[in-house]
């Protein structure tokens, strides 16, 4: 049991970066911010997961790989050929790409469910979809304030929906944003580990 716990404790957190593939409506420095978020995810000992697309997620993947980290893509396509030819999506800056065959809406669900937290940078409707999935799943989230698009509308949306504040960090600095998101993930993991240990203790 101790051996299994030691293995489990060495697992890296998986942080999703969600954002716009088209960036005309984003802030002028949105790509640079996305790249820095990707770098910070690696610097803070986590793994980057994206939807294997262009725009914001692509630049986050670029930052993660150039920082020497791990970058995982979850594609809407069913194969590498479809990923490139049908969806016209990139394959560079990834250590591996998982091909779902579930198109964008199905991919979004798998993307969010397979990660520990979601960070939103700029974004359009698909980004909002990923955000709401994470919100409904009570997943920790970070919003890069000042990046434009969906990210700069989320706080107002949350206030108008009357569903609580969620587990959301709003921050304009990539380093602080990633750090605060990971703090929430760690706090939740500690609480779950405590309950698990308590449950095991009661059964003996």
Image (cartoon, grey):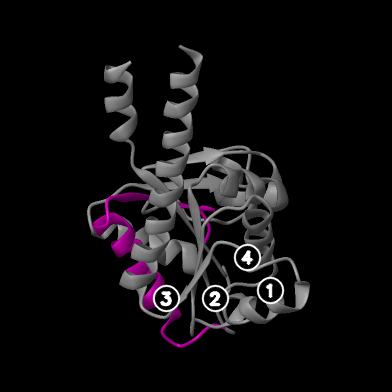
Q: Residue at x 55, y 78 (%)?
A: 23
- 8 sits to left or right of 135: left
Element on which disc 1 rests: helix
Q: Which residue is mark 4?
A: 127
Whichever of callouts 3 and 4 sits on the residue coming sooner in the sequence is 3
Q: For the magenta stretch, what is the residue range?
A: 26-54
Structural crowding at the residue carrying mark 1, measured as other residues with C-alpha within 10 Å and reported as few (<14), some (14–19) or many (≥20): some
Tell me which residue sits at (28%, 35%) in the image: 10
Across and down, in percent, residue 155 comes to 62, 78
Q: CA distance from mark 2 to mark 3?
A: 10 Å
Task: Specify the farthest residue to the bottom.
Answer: 28
Proximity of marks 1 and 3: CB atoms separated by less than 8 Å: no
Q: What residue did someone put label 3 on?
A: 31
Circles 4, 2 touching at the beta carbon (< 8 Å): yes
Q: Earlier in the sequence, mark 4 or mark 2?
A: 2
- Choose mark 3 or mark 4, whichever is in front: 4
* Circle on res. 122: 2
> Are the residues flagged by discs 1 and 4 in contact, CB closer than 8 Å?
no
In the image, farthest residue toward the top? 204
Mark 3 packing: few (<14 Cα in 10 Å), some, or many (20+)?
many
Residue 115 picture location, percent across and down = 50, 46
Is residue 201 placed above or below 76 in the rendered structure? above
Residue located beneath label 1 in the image? 158
């Amino acid at each position: 049991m101790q051996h299994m716990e030691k293995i489990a404790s060495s697992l890296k957190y998986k942080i999703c970066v969600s954002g716009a593939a088209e960036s005309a409506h984003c802030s002028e420095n949105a790509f640079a911010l996305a790249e820095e978020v990707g770098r910070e995810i690696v610097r803070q000992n986590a793994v980057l997961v994206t939807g294997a697309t262009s725009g914001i997620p692509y630049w986050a993947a670029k930052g993660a790989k150039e920082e020497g980290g791990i970058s995982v893509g979850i594609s809407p396509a069913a194969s590498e050929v479809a990923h490139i030819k049908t969806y016209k999506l990139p394959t560079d800056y990834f250590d591996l790409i998982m091909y779902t065959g579930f198109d964008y809406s199905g991919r979004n669900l798998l993307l969010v469910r397979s990660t520990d937290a979601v960070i939103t940078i700029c974004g359009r409707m698909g980004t909002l979809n990923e955000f709401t999935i994470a919100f409904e799943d009570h997943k920790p989230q970070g919003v890069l304030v000042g990046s434009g698009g969906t990210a700069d509308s989320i706080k107002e949306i949350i206030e108008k929906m009357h569903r609580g504040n969620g587990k959301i960090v709003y921050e304009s600095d990539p380093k602080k944003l990633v750090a605060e998101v990971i703090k929430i993930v760690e706090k939740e993991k500690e609480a779950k580990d405590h309950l698990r240990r308590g449950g095991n203790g009661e059964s003996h």
